[in-house]
Amino acid sequence: MKKKVNLIHGDITELSVDALVNSANKSLLGGGGLDYIIHKKAGPLMKEACIKLNKIKGGCQTGSAEITTAGALPVKFVIHAVGPRWLNGEKGEPQLLCDTYSNALKQAAKVKAKTVSFPNIATGVYSFPKHMAAEIAIGTVLSELPSYYEIEQVFFVCKDEVNFEIYKEILEQIEDPKIEILI
């Protein structure tokens, strides 16, 4: 069976999938941008789970991912993935972003998620260059997706037009017999 990769221009919090990936900060206690919106919409159950993870594990390191309940969101799980702040590429940021997507996929497979949605991790307040981030996201997910039999479908969800057009341009150039690209 072919894996499906979808590109959507819209609000990731309104998509009904098994696992939604949150572009989180290290504390997992909510921050700005998408992280703030996800925390607000998920409500107290997810917040309690994040507080517990923060106390037990000290949050989540850059490049890593942790999973919690989704609270009031229309998904089963939220995967909190911490991408790197862009520091001119001198602190291993590309590899850390690759690790972030890879670890989010591992977390999704752990809970047997069939569908997973990804935002544009680290491209907001963390200032990761959008085109480079899209290449890393797409490259990592498409290269690792076939090895996760549980995951059938991935959604790249772009809230802004700039990221959407970048992802579209990259995805339109991909031909992979194991993956069906839907734009």
Image: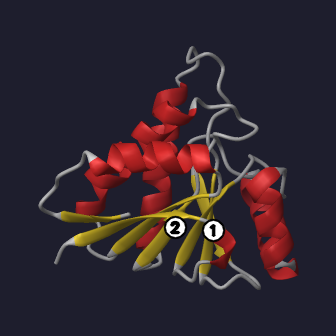
Apparent side of residue 58 relative to residue 12 in the rendered image (left or right): right
> Where is residue 52 drawn, in percent x and y?
80, 67
In this rendering, does residue 48 appear at all?
no
Query: Residue at position x 30%, y 50% from top?
Result: 172
Percent position of residue 47, x then y: 84, 71
Q: Residues within 10 Å of mark 2 (few under 14, many from 20)?
A: many
Say if mark 2 contacts mark 1, CB within 8 Å: yes
Of 147 and 161, which appears nearest the observer? 161
Q: Residues within 10 Å of mark 1 (few under 14, many from 20)?
A: many
Q: In this picture, is 114 found above or below 30?
A: below
Q: Quadrant of residue 182?
A: bottom left
Determine whether, in the image, residue 84 is placed left or right of residue 166: right
Q: Secondary structure at mark 1?
A: helix
Quadrant position of residue 48: bottom right
Name the residue: 65% across, 85% down.
74
Toward the viewer: 35 or 164? 164
Q: Quadrant of the N terminus?
A: bottom left
Q: Amino acid at mark 1?
A: Ile
**For residue 117, which numbered disc appears in the image?**
2
Tell me, yes or no, if residue 119 can be seen here.
yes
Query: Which residue carries the number 1 mark?
Result: 12
Residue 106 — which label?
none
